[in-house]
Amino acid sequence: MVEDLGQALAKAEEAWRERDPAWNRKMDQWEAWKKGSKDRERAANRAKKRAKDDEPESIQGQSWESSFNPSDPSPQFSFAGLKTDYSLSQLEEDIRSSLKWVGISEP
C-alpha cells in the first residue's frame, strides 16, 4: 500500500510539473542561474584579489538556486515537512546511523 501511494504521488507530481507554469518558470530561472556559474566564479575571484589581506571577506547572500534540486519532491507531493534547519545530508546521515544501530548495512 505504501509503495502504491509513493508511486501515485510521483506520477501526480510528474504530471503537475509538466503543466504548472510556476514550476516551469522556476526551472527556467534555475537553468539560467546554472549558466551564470562561471561568471559568478570569476567575479568572486576578482573580488578576492581586490580585497586586502586584513579585510574580512564579504559574505555573499545565497540564493534559492544554490540549494535547489529539481529531483527533490515538491512539498505538495510529500508528507515530509520542510524544516530549513534540517538538511537532506543530515537526514541521510541520521538514516545511515539508524540502520547501523539496528544492524542493517547500507545498500
Image (cartoon, rainbow, N blue to C red):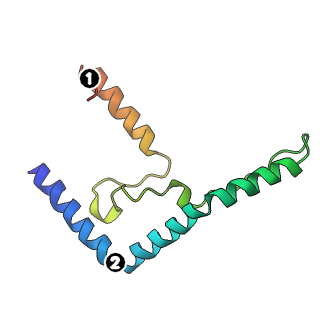
x, y percent for residue 15: 24, 71
Mark seen at residue 56: none
Which amino acid type is marked by label 2?
Asp
Q: Are marks 2 and 1 in contact (CB under 8 Å)?
A: no
Q: Secondary structure at mark 1?
A: loop
Give whichever of discs 2 and 1 has the lower sequence position. 2
Q: Return the residue at label 2.
A: 20
Question: In the picture shown, does residue 21 fall above or below 78?
Answer: below
User: Residue at the spot x=68%, y=60% of the render?
Assistant: 39
Q: Is residue 18 left or right of residue 49?
A: left
User: Residue at the spot x=31%, y=28% of the render?
Assistant: 98
Q: Secondary structure at mark 2?
A: loop
x, y percent for residue 90: 44, 38
Q: Return the residue at label 1.
A: 105
Query: In this orientation, does residue 5 appear?
Result: yes
The quadrant holding residue 103 is top left
Question: In the picture shown, does residue 105 fall above or below 63?
Answer: above
Q: Is residue 38 left or right of residue 96?
A: right
Which amino acid type is marked by label 1?
Ser
Question: In the picture shown, does residue 64 fall above or below 58?
Answer: below
x, y percent for residue 56: 84, 44
Compare residues 5 and 32 and report the one nearer the observer.
32
In space, the residues marked 2 and 1 are separated at their CA atoms by 40 Å
For disc 1, the neighbor class at 10 Å (few under 14, some 14 to 19, many from 20) is few
Compare residues 106 and 95 and report the one nearer the observer.
106
Compare residues 69 and 36 and report the one nearer the observer.
36
x, y percent for residue 88: 42, 44
Query: In this orientation, does residue 61 appear?
Result: no
User: Residue at the spot x=35%, y=27% of the render?
Assistant: 97
